[in-house]
Image (cartoon, grey):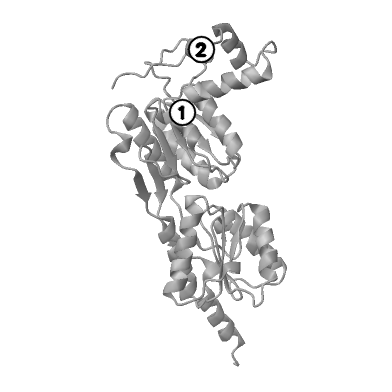
Amino acid sequence: MQPIKEVTIYDIAEKLNLSPTTISRGLKDHPAINKKTKKRINDTALEMGYRSNTFASNLRSQRTHTIGVIIPKMNSNFMSTVLSGMEKIANEANYNLIISQSLESAEKEMLNIKTMFNNRVDGLMISIAYDTIDYSIFDLFINKNIPLLFFDRTIDHPLCPNIEIDNQKSAYIATKHLISQGCENIVHITGNQQRNVYAERQKGYETALLEAQLPIKEGNTLVSTLDEQSGIDAAEAILEMHPLPDAVFVDNDNCAANCMIHLIEKGIQIPEQIAFVGFNNDPIAKIIRPTLTTINYPGFEMGQIAAKKLIAHLNGEESLTTTNYIGLRSELIPRESSARIKSKQQIDDEGAPQ
């Protein structure tokens, strides 16, 4: 494959019929250049795929031996384990990771992508922000044949592989487990349905209900950002439901734990009145009482596979386009929060006359 020519300020100058000096100053936000001209320059630079020469000593034919990683948030146990897996493989292969977070903002994510591009990373691994709907920014990498890989929160692109678990199957298993415990009125606390992760889990939840001939109630799906406050807000919404649901399936352990705590504070017995299943198998699932049933999401393994796949491509050992999907296995980990049948039996035994 022939190396793709780098776009220079001279190319931009020729297209806009401006001097290279004006282009350079406009890109550097020089006060001598008016705002309208700066906008023309920056819009054209983005359109043409121009990258500022942050590492002037490196020719494009040379590698920087850096890989960019963009995640939604750093304060996620799941993402921490993913990063640990990536770091292990990258270190072994003598690559460095540049890690940034989108803070669940499409605007911040776009800035991060441009920064990674301008810093000439050899490849990019990204988990999409909560509210991203425009994917055209990724053309910066794709048009330059710079490898791009999506993990966890992904988009469907023929040139970019996705690494994730079978979210639909995992949610189906979680919901079916609650049904097996005698639950019939199950609430699903989920995230933005534009994200593949949450849309697929909603499908799995609904599939399990339909299979059990249980109604799908629109009001039983609560869409949130799945943070701590979302768990408390969801608990308040559940307390307003009549009748109360007998189970809750939550797409995040942290949100599930906070929802449980708030309900317990309001006098709700778990799992006797409401059973719970979370997602991710975060440490909090073992700490909270009752312990939280959850779906194990192998984050460390995901990080390792993502890094191995990208580095193998960079080393010419395999192509990213040989597959567009890599699925990881997940499993249900039953704990106290969903043991509804057993808990009811204990109550009956304790209440039986001696």
Q: Secondary structure at mark 1?
A: helix
Q: Which residue is mark 2?
A: 9
Residue type for callout 1: Leu
Residue type for callout 2: Ile
Q: Secondary structure at mark 2?
A: helix
Quadrant housing residue 260: bottom right
Query: Could you say where residue 168 lies in the image, as x and y percent from the top left?
Result: 43, 59
Counting other residues with Cα less than 10 Å from the Cα at mark 2, is it few (<14), some (14-19), or many (20 or more)? many
User: Considering only vertical position in the picture, is 99 above or below 165?
Assistant: above
**Which residue shows up at 47% across the image and 42% down it?**
82
> In the rendered image, which quarter contains the N terminus?
top left
Q: Could you tell whether 36 is left or right of 317 in the image?
A: right
Marks 2/1: CA distance? 17 Å
Counting other residues with Cα less than 10 Å from the Cα at mark 1, is it few (<14), some (14-19), or many (20 or more)? some
Q: Visible in this render: residue 84?
A: yes
- Circle on res. 78: none
Q: Could you tell whether 177 is left or right of 291 in the image?
A: left
> In the rendered image, which quarter contains the C terminus?
bottom right
Tags 2 and 1 touching, CB below 8 Å? no
Query: Could you say where residue 149 lies in the image, as x and y percent from the top left?
Result: 41, 37
Q: Which residue is mark 1?
A: 140
Which residue is nearer to you in this view: 75 or 140? 140
N-term-proximal mark, 2 vs 1: 2
Q: Visible in this render: residue 280?
A: no
**Which residue shows up at 52% across the image and 51% down it?**
194
Query: Could you say where residue 125 lies in the image, as x and y percent from the top left?
Result: 45, 35
Which residue is nearer to you in this view: 81 or 256? 256
Which residue is nearer to you in this view: 98 or 206? 206
Quadrant housing residue 288: bottom right
